[in-house]
């Protein structure tokens, strides 16, 4: 069965920002299958060059890698895959992330960067394949609990600091080389040996009591916790409000709480 409903909304946040550098994607019938959906948020920095390049390229690469995997050139200073037992779909998503980053360099997009989060929801296989690079995040509401599907790659993460220092870099004031607050991203090719694009990956079995997924950039997560987010959505839908406006509600709540960033949110009901 396809997703039972999707709400998506984005906001430049004009009192805090004068440009919009986010892109979000909701692709139903992914790869031509009605039971597969692709949800993603790409959060740019340093201009729109990278997110505009990624807007359709990343999901195309994921589809291509699932169908016909190719050998990706080795990338220096990147750790091995998280587990040798990762599923073929997760390996395909990992290759697609790395390939998209390589292609952005080949396209001459050197100055801008982007964090990303994506969820491939396969309701036939009853799986969520999640990935992220940077601090964009996805969470799953399961009955009375909230499961984080991704991992924030912040520059103050001890494991990321260790990796960066092992590669010859440093973290100053919780920023890579004193510049970037995230430890992984697409683009940012001037710091690529330290700011890698290899994603965090997770595979989650869908259960009967799973309700919805929230996929969003850090403009939301900087001011709203995982549990608060799912509680807000549940209260909103139980109030009888239009489900299609749930993402807008979260965006407006983020701005009311003082978010200083662009904000993009997707809420997808399972």
Image (cartoon, rainbow, N blue to C red):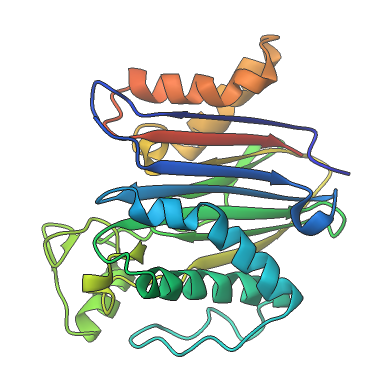
- Quadrant in the picture for the N terminus: top right
Q: Where is 107 relative to 259, above or below?
A: below
Q: Quadrant of residue 8?
A: top right
Q: Residue furthest front?
A: 107
Q: Where is 212 relative to 44, above or below?
A: above
Residue visible at 69% across and 66% down in the picture: 63
- Quadrant in the picture for the C terminus: top right
From the viewer's perspective, tell me whether residue 66 is left or right of residue 82.
right
Residue 11: x and y in percent read: 41, 27
Q: Where is 242 relative to 137, above or below?
A: above
Residue 219: x and y in percent read: 36, 37
Residue 257: x and y in percent read: 33, 22
Examine the rendering and report whether any part of residue 135 can be seen: no
From the viewer's perspective, tell me whether residue 171 is left or right of residue 117.
left
Q: Residue furthest top?
A: 240
Residue 144: x and y in percent read: 67, 35
Q: Quadrant of residue 94?
A: bottom right
Residue visible at 64% across and 23% down in the picture: 234
Residue visible at 68% across and 20% down in the picture: 243
Q: Quadrant of residue 159?
A: bottom left
Residue visible at 75% across and 74% down in the picture: 67
Numbered circles on residues, count: 0
Examine the rendering and report whether any part of residue 237 can be seen: yes
């Amino acid at each position: 069965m396809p997703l039972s409903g999707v709400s998506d909304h984005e906001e430049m946040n004009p009192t805090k920002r004068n440009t919009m550098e986010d892109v979000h994607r909701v692709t139903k019938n992914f790869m031509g299958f009605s039971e597969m959906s692709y949800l993603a948020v790409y959060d740019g920095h340093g201009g729109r060059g990278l997110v505009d390049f990624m807007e359709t390229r990343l999901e195309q690469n994921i589809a291509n890698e699932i169908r016909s995997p190719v050998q990706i050139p080795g990338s220096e200073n990147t750790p091995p895959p998280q587990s040798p037992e990762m599923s073929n779909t997760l390996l395909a998503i990992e290759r697609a992330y790395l390939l998209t980053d390589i292609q952005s360099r080949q396209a001459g997009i050197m100055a801008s960067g982007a964090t990303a989060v994506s969820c491939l929801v396969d309701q036939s296989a009853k799986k969520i394949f999640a990935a992220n690079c940077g601090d964009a995040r996805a969470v799953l509401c399961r009955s009375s609990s909230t499961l984080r599907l991704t991992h924030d790659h912040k520059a103050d993460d001890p494991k990321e600091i260790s990796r960066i220092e092992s590669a010859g870099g440093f973290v100053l004031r919780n920023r890579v080389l004193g510049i970037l607050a995230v430890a992984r991203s697409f683009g940012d090719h001037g710091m690529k040996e330290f700011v890698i694009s290899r994603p965090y990956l997770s595979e989650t079995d869908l259960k009967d009591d799973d309700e919805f997924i929230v996929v969003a950039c850090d403009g939301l997560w900087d001011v709203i916790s995982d549990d608060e987010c799912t509680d807000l959505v549940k209260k909103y839908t139980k109030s009888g409000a239009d489900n299609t406006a749930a993402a807008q509600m979260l965006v407006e709540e983020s701005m009311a709480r003082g978010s200083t960033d662009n904000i993009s949110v997707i809420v997808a009901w399972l």
